Amino acid sequence: MSAHAAQAIAQLVAEQPVRLLVVDDGRDNRLLLERILRPEGYELRFASDGCDALAQASAQRPDLVLLDVVMPGMDGFEVCRRLKQDQRLAEVPVIFLSALTEVDDKLTGLSLGAVDWVAKPFDAREVQARVRNQVHLRQMSRSLLRANHDLQAKQSRLNEDLAAAADIQRSLMPRTAPSGAEFELAWRFVPCQAVGGDIFNVLPLRDEHLALYVLDVAGHGVPAAMVTVSTVQSLSPLAGLVQAPGSGPPLAPARVLERLDAEYPLERFGKHFTIAYALLDLRTGRLRCSSAAHPRPLLQGTDGRIRELRAGGTIIGLDGLLPFTEDDLQLAPGERLLLYTDGITELADPQGRAFGEERLWAFLERRQGQPLQDLCDDLLAELRTFAAADEPRDDITFLALDWRGLPCPGPQA
């Protein structure tokens, strides 16, 4: 053992005395071991037979037992066997002391759970070195157990904090869907951790407009969640980013993304995010959409066919590097708008294959006309079946809107 390790053990012993139980029926051997070990600073206890050894071990729970093999009555092998059968004492290391030199005897001792074997007659330096080794291992084991306990306690507190943060994050999402004769909404949100980087919202705006967005911050956990919280606040109608102050109209989607891009440069949080943002005029069915490097919104016609809304630009965070464009179209009754995050298309099966856009489109085409709530439930079931027992590695967010069309005017009086 190195001088540094010996010094570390001496310091540990000084801080918390190490208890050694010496078991030998020979008085001279006990005195000799006392002279060898007492200068090391250990707290020594002595037993002259197996029964006394078991009684003292049960009462004091030593840190190490030095155990003679050949003793009258109960021999050392039986003492070791009983120590290892006691759950309280099973982890206490045992060093056998014996004049027996046969390999079979040593193998018997080690098979019973002993950690070492010291031959008689003793060499003082050998005894000290072997005891130091076991004390060092014992102290390391205890330190690891304490560290593990502390880590578990910290992890428990962290889990509680994450759960609280997840509750806060979920509170920022809509609890119930806005309702109207012109449209129907449904969504599903499945975070891969207690706190994720996905978030979505549906915002009723002035002049009978409805804004919808799905946002995905790079990464997971608390850092990503903090960005999502901040962006939700920025996208609140009261913050002035999605609609002009006062009586001004809602801002066009491309303009909203431009303002987000200026508000969230990469250096602010060290994270970028993607977003799909749509604005629907409930009086006319006019839909405008723009995406920032996000999975493109899908528009499904009454015939089940799907097309992508491709207008947009790059990720949020490049501070105006490229302009944002937007789609501007007129919804027909029965058409369906679908927004989602790449947690769906990048979901992997046990073989590592991605769910992909092709599977998503095929699923949506098969379910054309299905009620939205059933569609959302069936999509989650499809994803779980595809992933089998594997947990998703990314958040899953899906937001759908059915446009029913403008209500027919009532008969005039």
Image: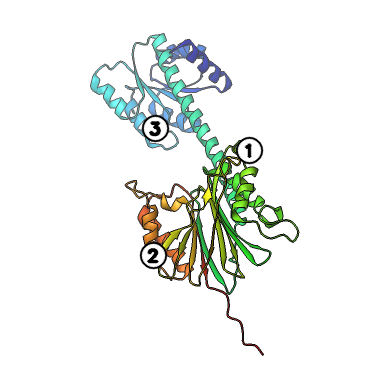
Front one among 27 and 396: 396
Identified by mark 2, the residue type is Glu
For the residues labelled 2 and 3, the Cα–Cα distance comes to 69 Å
Nearer-N-terminus badge (3/1):
3
Residue 212: tell me if it is visible.
yes
Which residue does the numbered mark 1 point to in the structure image? 268
For the residues labelled 2 and 1, the Cα–Cα distance comes to 41 Å
3 and 1 marks in contact (CB < 8 Å): no
Residue 377 in the image, given as x and y percentages of width and height: 45, 64
Residue 120 in the image, given as x and y percentages of width and height: 33, 13
Front one among 268 and 177: 268
Relative height, residue 262 to residue 191 (above, below): above
Quarter of the image with the C terminus is: bottom right
Colour scheme in the image? rainbow
Judged by depth in the image, the label closer to the viewer, 2 or 3, is 2
Identified by mark 3, the residue type is Leu
In what element is the residue under mark 2?
Answer: helix
Which residue does the numbered mark 2 point to in the structure image? 365
Residue 328 in the image, given as x and y percentages of width and height: 55, 60
